[in-house]
Image (cartoon, rainbow, N blue to C red):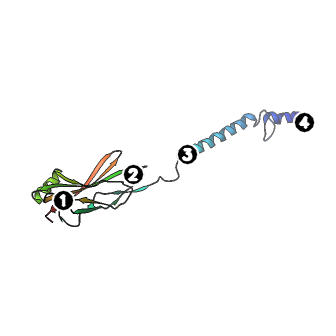
Amino acid sequence: MDRLAKRWSYYGWRLGAPGPRALGPSFGRSVGLFLGLALMLAALAACGASTTPGVTHQTYSYSSSSGPARDTWSPGQVVPVTWSARPARVSTDPRPARVVLTLKLYGPFATVDAAKKAVSSGTGPLAVTGPEIATDNWHPGPFSAVLALPGTLALGTYDLAQSATTTTGAGSVTARGDSIITIVAG
């Protein structure tokens, strides 16, 4: 009996008939090592594979804006402008892109054709600059600004340029909309 008790303590647990080292300590260690390794690999695989999708955000673009309600203004008046957002793509980016909305008045030009030519070439004297609105492409707006026309503004034809510049890590893109307005004596 002592001999059997020694076998059990020496070999660990045994299954089946007694034999030399049948299912002894090396088998137990092997099974334990295998199960430990399998659990560790399963845990690593679970950490690497995400079962929940990433957070998404609706982005918006401001490529179009609604210009002033009329095309004739007088010095000293205030010209209201609104930028309306349009849904763009759905993004998984961790941060929104920066968007800057600007309002500028170029001119005066002698004729409407001269103002249109300046718009197409991107040239012309800057007469008045409105306030900049800083936002990002995760906010749907709308955003409004006013352009205060100085009382000393010369009469003539002007280009009212409304732009939205979107800046990401890859660079900047500007979308611009132009309206031809006429400044007349009030």
Q: Are discs 1 and 3 less than 8 Å apart at CB?
A: no
> Closer to the N terminus: mark 2 or mark 4?
4
Which percent across, then down, holds residue 93?
A: 41, 50
Residue, disc 1: 151
Tag 2 secondary structure: loop
Which percent across, then down, holds residue 146?
A: 27, 60
Tag 4 secondary structure: loop
CA separation in Å, label 2 and label 4? 78 Å
Q: Are discs 2 and 1 less than 8 Å apart at CB?
A: no
The quadrant of the image that shows the N terminus is top right
Residue, disc 3: 47
86, above or below 31, in the image: below
Tag 1 secondary structure: loop
Amino acid type of the residue tagged 1 in the rendering: Gly
> Closer to the N terminus: mark 2 or mark 1?
2
CA separation in Å, label 1 and label 3? 67 Å
Please rate how many residues cluster around mark 3, counting C-alpha atoms within 10 Å: few if below 14, some from 14 to 19, many from 20: few
Where, by quadrant of the figure, is residue 39 drawn?
top right
Which percent across, then down, holds residue 28?
A: 73, 38
Please rate how many residues cluster around mark 2, counting C-alpha atoms within 10 Å: few if below 14, some from 14 to 19, many from 20: some
Front-most of residues 137 and 130: 130
Front-most of residues 11 and 15: 11
Residue, disc 2: 96
Tag 3 secondary structure: helix
Residue at 65% in and 39% down: 34
Q: Are discs 4 and 1 less than 8 Å apart at CB?
A: no
Is residue 33 toward the left or the right of residue 12 in the image? left
Disc number lying in front (2 or 4): 2
Residue, disc 4: 1
> Closer to the N terminus: mark 4 or mark 1?
4
CA separation in Å, label 4 and label 3? 51 Å
